[in-house]
Amino acid sequence: MLRKELHAAYGGQRQSGIITPKSVPDILIVTNPGSAAQHGYDKYEGLQADGSFAYTGQGQVGHQHFKNGNGALRDAAEKGRPIRLFTKSNTSVTYIGEFTTGQPSYSVKRITDSKKNLRDGIIFNLIPVDADMEELEPALTTPTDTVQESPWTPPDFSPLVIEAPAPPGPRTVSRIEFELQRDFGEWISNQGKTPLRLQLHSAGATIEPDLYVEESGWVVEAKKSSAREFVRAAIGQVLDYARLVRLSGRGATPVILLPGRPVAHIEALLFELGILLIVRDDNAFAVIQ
């Protein structure tokens, strides 16, 4: 629709990217990739690696402050106000969907203004409630290649956080899961096979399985426990990984790696879903058929 039609229906500020109509509680926000660079909005605005959307606050010159639309957007979740995102091209706008603020709801970063001076910009962290994320462009800092491949190395263990040397960034990994990944990678290598890291990029998001075995196409997700809640989480992750790997033209067999066998019901579920189960077996690993 034309932007003027949006305002005819709901009212609100006609020249602002953050629109707060009096006729509805909703906050309407507009992102315009075509003109974002003029005001420094292009540096962070866009789809992020975790599937959220970064939206730059209101104000083209000087530091941005929490007044008018910026204050309304910051307080939207607390006040129960839906956030409706639109993209703009020329005089037309396209509705993307409903969002809310994530945790944290915003950050302050250095961006340029319309006069090319550095200033403090408010970058809102928006997460989708019901939105067509495929329509959004990734931020400039988001990789766009479908797959990035690199040699696999065991994660460096610390009691709190495992730091991945490249995106997607920090991961919290338990000692049991760390040792499981390390021992399995070494077991694979001792068989003359090649464990790899694959960083998968899709719709602005970056995700990564624990390892990928080149010769067999195994896409591996490890969990520290065979309890139902851990296996259910692994199922969603590994199927997502495997689909993206297939789209890149590589072979992909989803694999869940556990320290022990789960209950029979869970094993049957994995079999029905076409997911291979591998468990620790003393100093080796067993493939459960």
Image (tube, rainbow, N blue to C red):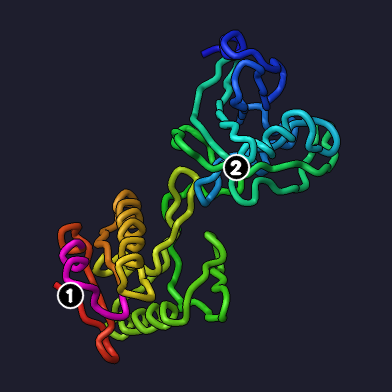
Residue 269, labelled with which disc? none
Q: At 81% from the left edge and 44% from the top edge, which residue is drawn?
A: 120
* Quarter of the image where the C terminus is located: bottom left
Q: At 19% from the left edge and 61% from the top edge, which residue is drawn?
A: 269
- Mark positioned earlier in the residue sequence (2 or 1): 2
Depth check, mark 2 against mark 1: the one in front is 2
List x then y, in percent, for residue 218: 28, 67
On the rendered structure, is 164 left or right of 43? left
- Give the structural element (helix, strand or loop) at label 1: strand
**Quarter assignment of residue 67:** top right
Residue 213 colored in magenta in the image? no
- Give the structural element (helix, strand or loop) at label 2: strand
Q: Which residues are magenta?
A: 258-269
The residue where tag 2 is placed is 101
Q: Is residue 7 above or below residue 145?
A: above
Q: At 66% from the left edge and 17% from the top edge, which residue is drawn?
A: 22
Residue 268 colored in magenta in the image? yes
**Quarter assignment of residue 68:** top right
Query: Is disc 2 surrounded by few (<14), some (14 to 19) or many (20+) residues within 10 Å?
Result: many
Q: Is residue 37 above or below residue 208?
A: above
Q: Is residue 16 above or below residue 285?
A: above
List x then y, in percent, for residue 129: 48, 38
